Every structure is written in structure tokens, then in C-alpha cells.
Amino acid sequence: MTTLVPNPLDSDSQYHRFHHIDIAALEDLELLDELWALRPLLWGSPPDHWLRERVNKLEGELQRRSVDSSYKLSSRPKLKLAEGVKL
């Protein structure tokens, strides 16, 4: 599990990830993807592990975006029904 924790001395992007600076720049789907990928890994990890901190930060950012009325979540284009299908 230590390989999942970025090494802040390797690069700027690893430094930003280690300190959660990168979260504000992530797209909504990237936030959700990372959150869903990390949650199963929390089982059995110590309470002070970096992954728990990361998940808390990701959840906080998603909560902030959903509450902030000036922020609009990424809108998906509406799907067009296939021709011949009537609902």
C-alpha cells in the first residue's frame, strides 16, 4: 500500500498529490474515479494512513462543489434516442 502514497521528492506533481493541492484542479469524474478506487483500500489501513486523509479531502471537495451554487458540475450531453424508438 505504500506504493499508492506519492513521494513528494520525486516530482512537482507527486508533491502536489501528496499535499492534496491537485484536488481543486481535478474534473468531477476524476474525483469520483479516484474516490471509488481508494475506498476499498481503506479496509484494514491504520486511522492515520495517507489514503484516509486523501479520501477525506476528495469527499470534502465533492461536497464543496455540490453545495457551492456558483459551481456547476460537469454537464453531460443529453443522449439522443435512436430513430424509431418512441417513448
Image (cartoon, rainbow, N blue to C red):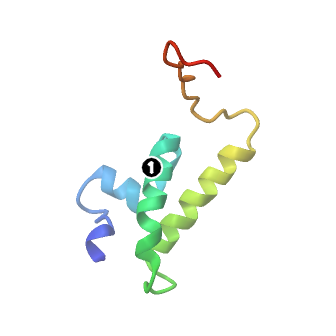
Judging depth in this view, the residue of 45 and 19 nearest the camera is 45
Q: Residue at x 47, y 60 (%)?
A: 36
Residue 40: x %, y % from top left: 44, 72
- The residue that label 1 is drawn on is 22
Q: Is residue 77 left or right of residue 15?
A: right
What residue occupies the far left of the structure in this picture?
Answer: 10
- Dot 1: within a 10 Å radius of its alpha carbon, few (fewer than 14), some, or many (20 or more) residues? few
Q: Is residue 48 left or right of residue 11?
A: right
Residue 19: x %, y % from top left: 44, 61
* Tally of marks: 1
What residue occupies the far top of the structure in this picture?
Answer: 83
Name the residue type under label 1: Asp
Residue 30: x %, y % from top left: 44, 46
Q: Residue at x 61, y 51 (%)?
A: 62
Q: Residue at x 48, y 43 (%)?
A: 29
Q: Residue at x 49, y 18 (%)?
A: 82
Look at the numbered disc 1 and give the secondary structure of its residue: helix
Location of the C terminus by quadrant is top right
Q: Is residue 63 left or right of residue 25?
A: right
Judging depth in this view, the residue of 71 and 15 nearest the camera is 71
Residue 78: x %, y % from top left: 57, 23
Q: Quadrant of residue 15?
A: bottom left
Q: Quadrant of residue 8?
A: bottom left
Location of the N terminus by quadrant is bottom left
Height in image: 64 above or below 25?
A: below
